[in-house]
Image (tube, rainbow, N blue to C red):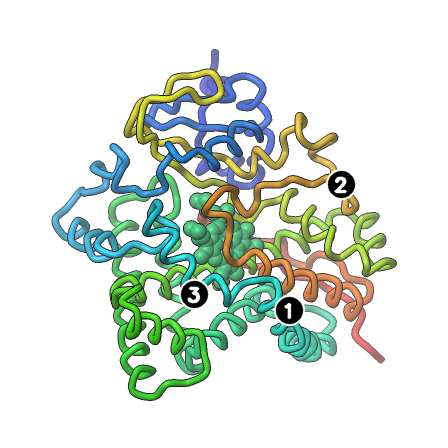
Amino acid sequence: MSASDTLEFNPFLPEVHEDPYPLYHRLRAEDPVHRSPLGFWVLTRHADVLAVLRDPRMSRDPRRSERVALLRASAEVDELLAAEEAAPSMLFVDPPDHTRLRTLVNKAFTPAAVERLRPRVEELVAGLLDQAAGAGAMDVVEGLAYPLPVTVICELFGVPEADRDRFRAWSRGLVHLLDPLVASDALERALRARQALRDYLGGLIAERRAHPAGDLLTALIAAEDQGHQLTEAELVSMCVLLLVAGHETTVNLIANGMLALLRDPEARARLQADPALARGAVEELLRYDSPVQFTSRHALEDLDVGGRRVRAGETVVAVLGAANRDPAQFPDPDRLDLARSPNRHLAFGGGIHFCLGAPLARMEAAVAIPAMLARLPGLAPGPAPPVRRDTVTLRGLSSLPVTFQAPG
Ligand code: HEM
């Protein structure tokens, strides 16, 4: 057997990074509960991924994993990890802390609360497309997919416009922490970026405490002050999570979604002709090329997963992107079918950590994608090819050039 025949889960290989779906299909068919030589398990079937996400014996807390010990390569890294571990965000804790933290922000992200933001989202999209429309060419990422969600989340939190560029650099740096393996120098850089962001937010919180405003940050500070429901360190971790999620995910939904539509003129024409398809189309684009490809869980006790024995402390990587192409759940899974129904994709996860920002991400994409198709006639990819981001957990593009007919 040649090296290329060996079945291994390595999302960093260039061909897998470009198109992971053939590998996912092979893993699912040949070894659906795969034991990586690096010591973790890899799940690619929809049923197994969903079962693990819903299983209370599976922890989201990395402090309960054997593998985290391996990260503590140097005293400096250890110290930087400790700052966040003292007060992790809701994404990295189990109940009861998870329930307490999530309840505090839940109401800001309900579908009804998000609907109130729709007029502002429409206004932002129209403004960004006005800027682009005359030129006959744009980069979808720089021109729309990135500035839209970033402006929305920064406005919710009251992050001053002048600070947003610094923010972008920190956010870009720290998302490498989400990848399954990080080289030790990259890890240190990412942890420094996170610390810089924490320090900045500490300053913003102090400023907002002195001068309350009508934003989400002020509301969270009030929760901290009044009920002892939230410590200051937890408040900072919560802001890091929400602001980074707001910077790094919806951008990928809009860009991956536009790329899929650019490559499928029939689907694109269908959506253009019938904007009422938008809501279902966004679900299909989330399934087809998922912005978050994996998440992980750590077994709290010995248990069976998809017919194999996982031991307490072992880590299971749930490949959402593979679950979303499982033919047992989705007929003809590699076809983009904007009217697919049912569409029980796992792009937002499942169980108690199901994405808090899902209603916001869905609404932003459902406004932005049809608006691009309507406002930019003759949309076509090019002249340069799209460029993929180097992260693997977050699957996205750093550039997606397109051309179209300029008016007049
Ligand atoms: C297309 C865009 C998005 C995708 C694909 C996405 C995906 C996900 C996934 C897969 C999870 C679950 C992770 C796990 O179970 O381990 C998650 C959790 C989360 N997401 Fe999103 N997300 C998106 C947008 C957003 C936005 C815009 C926000 C907020 C501004 C957000 C906030 C969160 C939070 C706070 C959690 C943790 C929830 C918890 O632990 O209870 N997400 N997201």
Query: Label 2: which residue?
Result: 341
How far across and how far down the image is residue 325, in percent?
A: 63, 34
**Res 115 label:** 1
Residue 388 visible in this rendered orientation of the protein: no
Give the residue type at disc 1. Answer: Glu
How far across and how far down the image is residue 227, in percent?
A: 30, 69
- Asked if 348 appears above or below 245 in the picture, the reply is above
Q: Earlier in the sequence, mark 3 or mark 1?
A: 1
Query: Label 3: which residue?
Result: 243
- Dots 3, 1 in contact, CB < 8 A: no
Residues at marks 3 and 1, CA–CA distance in whole angstroms:
19 Å
185 or 294: nearer the viewer: 294
Residues at marks 3 and 2, CA–CA distance in whole angstroms:
32 Å
How far across and how far down the image is residue 286, in percent?
A: 63, 48
Q: Residue furthest front?
A: 227
Q: Nearer the viewer, mark 3 or mark 2?
A: 2
Crowding around mark 1 (Cα neighbors within 10 Å: few <14, some 14 to 19, many 20+) is some
> Residue 393 vs residue 77: left or right?
right
Q: Residue furthest bottom?
A: 211
At 44% from the left edge and 22% from the top edge, which residue is drawn?
A: 305
